[in-house]
Every structure is written in C-alpha cells, then in structure tokens.
Amino acid sequence: MAGLFKNLLVLFFVFQNTCLGFRSPLSVFKRYKDTTRSFSSECLGSDQPVISLGLSDFALDIRMPGVTPKQSDTYLCMSVPLPVDDEAYVVDFKPHASMDTVHHMLLFGCNEPSSTENYWDCDEGTCKDKSNILYAWARNAPPTRLPEGVGFRVGGETGGRFFVLQVHYGDISAFRDKHKDCSGVTLHLTHQKQPLIAGMYLMMSVNTVIPPGEKAVDADIACHYKRFPMHLFAYRVHTHRLGKVVSGYRVRNGQWTLIGRQSPQLPQAFYPVERPVEVSYDDTLAARCVFSGEGRTTETHIGGTANDEMCNFYIMYYMEAKHAVSYMTCTQNANPELFRNIPQEANVPIQIMSDMLKMTHGHHEETKDSDKSSLLKQAKKEEILEQSDFYSLLSKLLGEREDVVHVYKHNPTEKAESDLVAEIANVVQKKDLAREITNHDERDSTNLVRDRIQSEHGEENWEKEHAGDFHIEEAVEWPGLDLKLGQVSGLALDAENNLVIFHRGDHVWDENSFDNTFVYQQRGLGPIEQNTILVLHPSNAKLLHSLGKSLFYLPHGLSIDKNGNYWVTDVALHQVLKLGPNEKEPLLTLGVALQPGSDKNHFCQPTDVAVDPNTGSIYVSDGYCNSRIIQFSPNGLYLMQWGEGTETSLGRDKPGQFHIPHSLALIPDFSQLCVADRENGRIQCFRLETGEFIREIKHKSFGRELFAVSYVPGLLFAVNGMPYPGEAEPVQGFVMNFSTGEITDTFIPLRKSFEMPHDIVASEDKTVFVGDVHAKAVWKFASTEKSGTIVEGRLKNNPESTDPVKKQEKQHLVQQHTSTGISFVLITTLLIIPVVVLLAILLFIRWRKTTVYRGDGEHKLDSSSGRILGRVRGKGSGGLNLGNFFASHKSYSRKGFDRVSTEGSDQEKDEGEGTDSEEECSAPPTPPAPSSF
C-alpha cells in the first residue's frame, strides 16, 4: 500500500507540474535556482523540470523544449544536468511520447554532453565522453519498472552528471500543422542508497546477410561472461521489418535457460523476465534473431537504411553495488557450434494479428507504400553521417525506422568485419574513430555495412585476424628517434593518440642514487629543471605541449586517464602523482615524499599506475622494494592490496608472487589487470575487483626479464630485457593474442638497437612506441598487412546465394580453384625434388664415410666433403644460417623458429657508462639483487 501511495504521489506531482503549472516550493536544487528551461506553451505549463517528492526523492522531467522537425528521419538531442552533486539513483521511468510522432527515444547518462544548446542535431554527437544507455522506448511501449532496491547510479564520484535525451522523428507528416513536440521521459530519483545497481547489456549482430527470398535466416550472437554475477530482470528486442522472432538465453553446462523471447513487430518495450535468471562467471549469453527474406529481390545487410536490417537483444540487469558495471556489449558469435543445441522455440516465428501489426506500425502505415517512390527520390539528397560521435550511428542502428530511407555513404571494401567490431568497442570506451566516410556511387553507398567477412569461429577468428594478419616493423621515416631526451622511463597515448613521453632530463639512476634502506641520496641536486612530460605529434614528432619542470627527481611510470589527466610515479619521491594537462601542481598525491615504506600510506619505489575508466579506481604497482599491487578509490583512499615477494629459494614462482611488478596494463573489456612481473620474466593477470589470480603468460623467448606490457582490444604488446651471459633470447618486442597468450609476432628496430627497452604503448591501429632507458630514445613501429588473409576469408565466408548467375560464378571459381590446386601440386613437387637430391647426397656421403673409416680410424673426410657437411649443418665458416636467412625476409613468419638477433649485443653496451642500477639485466645468472630502473 505504501508503494502504491508513493507512485500515486509521483504521478500527482508530475500532473501538477506538466498540466497545471504548479511549482513545488520544496524543489530547491542548486543547479536550478537560476537556470530554467523555456518550453512552448503548447507543451508544459511550467518551466521547472524538478519536483521534490519529500526529503530523499524527486522527479526529473526530461522533455524536448518544443521542437518542430523540418524533415523526416530527424534525430534531435537535448541535455539536462543532474540537479544534485551527490550520488542518486534512478528507480523509475515514465515515457511521454506517441509513435504517431516519435519513432524511438534513447536516454543516455554521461558527464559532458556534445552541446550546451537547448537542443541540437544528434549527428553532432550525444556525449563528448563515455555514455551509457539508461533507457530505450519505441512503438508505444509501456513504462519500465525496476525491481525494489534496484536503481541506475548517477552523480557522485562514478555516476554521470548529465542526462541526454535523443528523439528520432521518423515521419514528419504528423507535423503538418506545425505544432511543437515535447516528448520525453520523467525519472523518479532517490538519494536512498540502493543495494543493487542496474545496468544494460546489449547483444548486437554486425555481420548478418539475408539472401532474397530465403524463408528463414538466423543471426546468432554469443559471448562468454567474465564478470561478477548479474541478475536479469527485463529484456527488449529490436529488428526492422524482416525480423520474425528474437530470443535470448543463458547457457550453463550445456543447459539453455530462456531470458526472453518476443516478436520485434510488437511494441518494443522492456518486458519483464518471466523467471529469475542469474548469469555467473564463465556462463555464455546467446541470442538468435530469425529473419525472412521473402519479398526482397536483393541481399539484406545489417545497417541503418530502409534496405537494411538490425538484430538487437537488450538485457536490463542488476549487480551488487560493489561490483556493478553500468554497460556491456556483445557483438560476436564466440561459439557457432553452440547453436546446434538451441531450443526449437527460438526458430518458431511469433504470429502477430494484422490489427496488432497495424497498430504497432502506426496510422501512417497505409500511406508508406504509395509514397515509397517519392521517398526513394528524396534519398538522393543523402545525409552523410558525422563521425564526431559514433553513438549517433549506434542509436540509429538500435532503432532505425525502415519506412524512411536514410542513406549513409560507405566504402564497402575498406574495412572487414573485425574493424566494425573494433569501432563498436570504441563506442563502449568512447574512442575516436579512424574510419573515413567517403563518396562512392549509389550502388555501393546504400549500405552502412557491406561485404563484411563472416567469421565461422566467432571471437577466436576475430582475434586471429587481429593478431595474425599483420607484422610490426619500424617506421623508419619517423623523426622522433633523434630527439634529445634523458632516460626514457614511461610512455602513454592521450585521447588524440598523441605520444606522451616521461623522461629524466639530466638526472640518472645509478648506484649512488639510494642507500640500502632505499632512501634517495641525491636530494642536493634538486628536482629536474627540464620539462619531464613531453607531448608529441605521433606522425612528425612535433612538440605540442610540455610540463613537469621542477616536480620530479627520478620519473618512472606514466599513464593517462579518460579525462586526460597524467598519472606518474617517481621512485625517488616514493610517490604517485596526478597532474592535469595544464596544471603546474599535482591534483592528487599518494605516498609521503622521499619516505619509503610498506604500509597503506607509503610506497617503496613505485613503478607504474593505471586508472580504471569505468570505476575511476587507481592501481599502483609497488614496486622495486615492495612486491604488491595496491588499489585506491578515485579520490585516493586505500581499498586493498595483493601480492608477495617471490620465494627464490624454492626455485619456482607462484601465482600472485612478484619480483619487481614493473608495468601495468588495464583490460577494462574483461575487468582484468595484467602485470609485467619483470624479474620473473612473465605476465600475470588478475581480476580487478578482487585481485584474484586469473592466468600467467610466460614464454622461453621472454628470457629472464619482461619489462613492460600494453593492451589494445584482442592483443598484448610487450618488451623484454637483454639476455644474461650465455643465454640466447634476444631483446625484442612481442605481439600476443590476448585470449590465448600465443606470440603472433616479434619485432626489433632497424635504426640503432634496443639496449634496455623500458616501456611500450600501442594504439588500436597497431602503431607501437617503445622507450629505451639506456639508449635515451623512442622508436615508432607500424603494422604492415600480410597478404592472403582477407581474400581467403572472403572466399571462405561468402554467404550462399540463390541467384543463378552467382552460382555460375561460384562454379567458375571452383574451376579456378581446381586449376590452382594443380599448380600448387606441381610447384610442391618441384620444391621437393632438390630436398630429395640433398638427402641422397647426405646418405651417399655417410656411406662413403663408414666405408673409409672401416679400414683406418684415423682417416678424415676430404676437405670438400667437410665443407659441404659443415654448411648443411650451419657450422662451417661462412655457412648458411637458416635462422638468419629466413629472418631477413620481411614476409617470413617467425612462428616455430627462434629469432636470431642480428642487431645489438651485450658487447654494444658501454659498461663504463652503464652506472644505472637497472644495468643488472646483464648481470651473472644469479645476481645478488634485482636491477632497478
């Protein structure tokens, strides 16, 4: 009864505010004291959007400020700030819209809207920073109710401070009378702390192709869940007109549990999950959309035009507050074999009565076919999608109305499916897109997504494509190698992919820097007088910005958070500092200056720092004289730590033990933190929330030391140290598949040589920078594509077509493939013949050898035979070294061979000059103490 009274009270105040012009005297909120919104008299009777509902609750009305769209397919956005500074929770949504005028609405939460205007064209973007979808409405959907004790967290330290409403006006025929629209949504918020935090999980297909006339086509999506448990309470489906049924499941130990199943032609509301469903670590989330291509004369692809389709399955969930993640996506099919066992119900279309179908499509439906030709003509006035915010594209993909033609120009041959997946990952992390939208003929430009390679092995194939179809080589034209720098200790990339260097200026770390208690001994030199943080253009190495003068003694680690702040460590100060891009003084300092320690308030030579973009939590690797990882809250409060020193006497390294945790790579996609465990020569990955050990990555080619690690989606990059005397593993860079840990490529510079590569950073376009603390240099490396991968993928994955012409082309392709196969056999035979001849010669020589030795044991092979054998075995003077021979060819894949270092050696290092304590990378195999740096 109390809950019913509360809801009635909310509706009463909303009614007073929207209809009678009542302004509550209790609505005293700081941000709205002096700032109000102007609404058309046709919309609301009040310009006050906030209504107090007692001491802890209030309603926030988010409405379009009286707009009249000028053309069909208009997307308009407006923002409303959260009227309080402290944390609040959205516990209810009440939509105010009709599909007569509005096709769909999306509500986002973020910290910085794309515009400060009353409203703006959404092609300018929704938010400048990361944004989360909080609510979606379409087709006269009813209100969405959240369970008791569940709320979307907003405000405070981690929640968004703005709401951005996006409204899609599909058909403007309803605006012939020039009326003004004030569609929107009313939120019920509370300050009462909710024990359970709501979030949104979006499953979306990106590579489905629907052949014309095909009765049933499946679009399957599946991802492995790798987080804390979440509880599902509502779902929403979305396709365009060809969609018949959309189903979502949790798969655990082979058992399929239904989350929700619905026709996308019904009102696209969030429907409640019939039975409680919990998703735990290592479960699989799977969804299937069933389409019919009947009535179509051409293939239908995923995209945002009238000729395209969509396959979306939304899930609303809640998690315990301490583990909550607000937004997650799944755009791959990680296990195609899984769908062989999908319940039969997922393949059965849901029949919709014709009157219901007519109602859900709106009263303009009957006029659409007659106006189709005029709409197609109108489409020639193509609107090119702005790239400033990919969320605009995402929202259109989530809810595009098929009866309005909206054409995006796109070159279908420029990118493969993996690039689209990477772009959608960028949407989640709010990165800038690298894709350019260019003009092409109408035939190619009617699709947003065309000719995408369909992966038969889902996520595994995607990662292999990302990890195996390129080779890293030095960008020899980059002038940054010639910069005059001090010891380069840290590297990072900012939001614009500018290179940021952290160096030591005229200071060096040598054997005189610290005493045996790790107290810095050279304070008399004062702090470094040069700017220690340099921001360079990634292409021409032009200095864009610099800072850090007179702040540091011995810089070490560097990272940049999502807001552009610099986080650094100083091993002499024993501190971690947060610097604004334009600030001269630290914004936050952790640790006590010049005082080493091992408690909650002290560090001992901290090496690196990483900031979680989702939660703002701070992770510090500490360090040279402590062996731990420490987690702090966004404002610097100690939360927890894990790790211990390696028990060297046992001769083995246990999980969670460190021997100098030297570098951190935060993996927000999987909520993991990977640590370069330097002196143990390995990478250890842990769960962010608990510090629980997940896995170890260790390879013989790492050698004894692994200095640094960097992550981009699907890949890990790393650099090792110089080999110990008598050991062969060269110093080099590594590229690894993140999921498997397999090394897919290695690289070394062409100009100069690695001496002690100290840090590495990579961007999503596979541009890599390596900083060397001894060479005092930074190298740039770039990826070069390997031939054959993409073409082979296309031949393998092209969907079947019923077109007879295409069948003839396919037969012709098979004939070509057959002839190619014959050629391959012929070439193989020709290559085998010399090998057979060589083996025959070896057998003959061996036979001669045994014959000669039979009579006189002191007889030796003649010199010519010795030279032949020596060269075949690679031991003769000037003989053939197969490792060097193959490694000298650019197209050579090093998988299966130990790479031979041809540049640089221990002898190239100036032993007299190498006074830095990190020189111990070239110490004897059992050094008394680990090297520093």
Image (cartoon, rainbow, N blue to C red):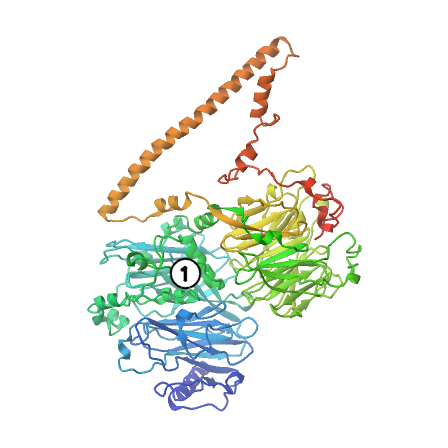
Residue lying at the far top of the rendered structure: 855
The picture places residue 875, in percent across and down from the top left corner, at: 61, 27
Asked whether, in this view, residue 759 is left or right of residue 510, the answer is: left
The picture places residue 194, in percent across and down from the top left corner, at: 52, 74
313 vs 789: above or below? below
Asked whether, in this view, residue 88 is left or right of residue 642, the answer is: left
Q: Is residue 616 visible?
A: yes
Three-letter residue code for mark 1: Met
Residue lying at the far left of the rendered structure: 370
The picture places residue 587, in percent across and down from the top left corner, at: 64, 70
Q: Residue at x 56, y 25 (%)?
A: 872
In-front residue for pair 484/98: 484
Q: Residue at x 44, y 55 (%)?
A: 223
Q: Secondary structure at mark 1?
A: strand
The picture places residue 845, in percent across and down from the top left corner, at: 55, 16
Residue carrying label 1: 203
Check disc 1: other Cα within 10 Å, few if <14, some if 14-19, many if 20+: many
Total marks drawn? Answer: 1
Q: Can you say which quadrant of the picture contains the N terminus?
A: bottom left
